[in-house]
Image: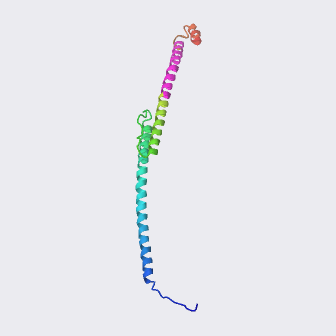
Amino acid sequence: YGNHFTVWINLYKVFNIIKITLYTLLIIICLVLIFGVWLIWQLSQRLTTPLSYLSSATEKKVSLKIKQSNQRMEDRLPEPTSPTEVNELAVSFNQLLDVISEKEVREKQFVSDASHELKTPIAAINGHLKLIKRRGREHPEIIENSFDY
C-alpha cells in the first residue's frame, strides 16, 4: 500500500493526432456538404424540369386561348414519361381539356340550334308586322289574321 508511482507522459503526439483528426473531419464535412448541395440541386432540376415544361406549355395554351377566344383548343399538353407523378398530372390535364372541349362544342351547338329555332318564329312575326304596316289601313282584316298568327 505504501508505493505510489507518478508517470509523466508527453501528450504532444496525442494532441497532434487529435488536431489532424479534427481537421480531416472538418474537410470531409465541408466536401460532403458541398457535394450534397450540388447533388440536391441536380436532383431538384431533374425532378422539376418536367413540371416547368408542363407549366410553360399550360401558360402558352391559356394565353393562346385568351387571344383567340373563338378558336377551339385542339392541342393537348405534353405528357412527360418521367417522373410518373408528372405524367399522371399531364394525363389528367389532357382528360380535363378533352371534357372542356367537348362541353364547349355542345354549348356552341346548343346556342346555334336555339338561335335557329328562335329566328324562324321571329321572322314570321316580323313579316306579319311589316304586312300590317304596309297594308293594315287599307285591309283591316289582315290585322286580325296577323294577331291570331
Q: Residue furthest front?
A: 1
Against 4, residue 144 (above or below) is: above
Q: Looking at the image, which is closer to me, 3 or 9?
A: 3
Residue drawn 47% across the image and 39% down it: 92
Quarter of the image where the N terminus is located? bottom right
Residue 61 screen position, x and y as percent: 42, 40
Q: How many marks?
A: 0
Q: Quadrant of residue 59?
A: top left
Residue 116 screen position, x and y as percent: 49, 21
Q: Looking at the image, which is closer to me, 7 or 60?
A: 7
Against 102, residue 128 (above or below) is: above
Q: Quadrant of residue 86?
A: top left
Magenta: main secondary structure equals helix
Is 112 contained in the magenta span? yes
Residue 76 screen position, x and y as percent: 42, 37
Q: Quadrant of residue 14?
A: bottom left
Q: Looking at the image, which is closer to me, 53 or 114?
A: 53
Q: Residue furthest bottom?
A: 2
Residue drawn 59% across the image and 9% down it: 144
Q: Looking at the image, which is closer to me, 37 or 96?
A: 37
Q: Which residues are magenta?
A: 106-132
